[in-house]
Image: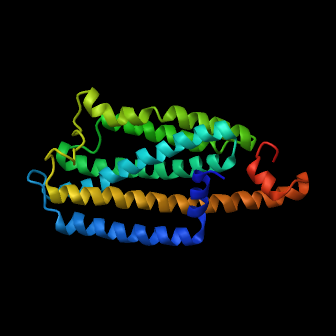
């Protein structure tokens, strides 16, 4: 078993899940206190800037989730091990959730700043495309086909769709955009030290929350696959574990 596979097994274990839940709760609480109480209001936007402490980390988690889909999809195509397909599927679901959250929070922020809930700004447009790509990815996973073929198609979509992630990130630099450029937290005083600290804790807490959600979703996915394999095992005459690890024969 590789180190990545051992890490996946540790995350799915209930003890690891409980530890992650505690870390996520503690870090999110610290982030909320720093963001809402300690961090000062912005000189221009006032308290509206506090949306940044959720909006930006949510966008980061979306990037991270789709990067995991990209790597896991490649690993699945190389190894044909369903654990990688399971990891990609779980991460895609979380990525879609956080991309939608990013768009909603961005719209709430845009209304008082830009005077409109939505505009076809390059950053907003490419983010909406990103959301549609991975909603399509989840739709591919629902196609009534063999599990192995469905996993291959989903892996291809997960790999090709990731191309849009750097486009989203760099869109504010490539094209004229209403959207502000990313704040630089290290070496350049784009934000005050306290605001930078609050945003940094936000990144950390959202990342831990992502890992916790992944652990829960992987465990649920494993249980779902086991239930299907146990129902099929007597009919096809193969052990449950074989059916779970080799969907083409299942």
Drawn side of residue 20 relative to residue 108, left or right: right
Q: Is residue 106 above or below residue 198?
A: above
Q: Toward the viewer: 118 or 154?
A: 154
Callout count? 0
The image position of residue 66, as x and y in percent, is 48, 43
The image position of residue 151, as x and y in percent, is 67, 41
Drawn side of residue 45 relative to residue 142, left or right: left
Q: Please identify the residue farthest to the top as the structure is shown.
A: 175
The image position of residue 84, as x and y in percent, is 62, 47
> Taking the image as drawn, is residue 196 in sight?
yes
Which colour scheme appears in the figure? rainbow
Q: Is residue 20 above or below residue 239?
A: below
Q: Toward the viewer: 204 or 4?
A: 4
The image position of residue 8, as x and y in percent, is 58, 57
Q: Is residue 76 above or below residue 93?
A: above
Examine the image and state in which quarter residue 54 appears.
Answer: bottom left
Drawn side of residue 8 relative to residue 47, left or right: right
> Taking the image as drawn, is residue 121 in sight?
no
Q: Residue at x 38, y 39 (%)?
A: 127
Q: Residue at x 51, y 45 (%)?
A: 68
Q: Residue at x 81, y 58 (%)?
A: 240
Q: Toward the viewer: 135 or 16?
A: 16
Q: Residue at x 50, y 34 (%)?
A: 161
């Amino acid at each position: 078993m590789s180190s990545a596979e051992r890490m996946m097994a540790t995350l799915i274990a209930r003890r690891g899940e409980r530890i992650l839940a505690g870390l996520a709760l503690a870090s999110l609480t610290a982030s909320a206190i720093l963001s809402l109480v300690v961090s000062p209001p912005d000189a221009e936007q006032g308290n509206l800037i506090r949306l940044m402490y959720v909006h930006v980390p949510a966008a980061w988690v979306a990037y991270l989730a789709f990067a995991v889909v990209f790597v896991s999809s490649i690993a699945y195509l190389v190894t044909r091990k369903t654990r990688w397909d399971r990891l990609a599927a779980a991460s895609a679901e979380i990525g879609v959730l956080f991309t939608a959250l990013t768009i909603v929070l961005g719209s709430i922020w845009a209304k008082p700043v830009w005077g409109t809930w939505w505009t076809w700004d390059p950053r907003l447009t490419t983010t909406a495309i990103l959301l549609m790509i991975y909603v399509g990815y989840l739709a591919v996973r629902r196609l009534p086909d063999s599990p192995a073929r469905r996993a291959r198609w989903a892996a291809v979509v997960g790999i090709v769709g990731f191309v849009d992630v750097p486009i989203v990130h760099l869109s504010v630099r490539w094209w004229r955009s209403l959207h502000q450029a990313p704040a630089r937290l290290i070496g350049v005083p784009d934000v005050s030290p306290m605001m930078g600290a609050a945003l940094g804790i936000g990144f950390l807490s959202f990342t831990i929350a992502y890992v916790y959600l992944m652990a829960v979703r992987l465990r649920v996915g494993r249980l779902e696959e086991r239930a299907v394999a146990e129902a099929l095992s007597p009919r096809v005459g193969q052990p449950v574990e074989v059916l779970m690890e080799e969907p083409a024969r299942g």
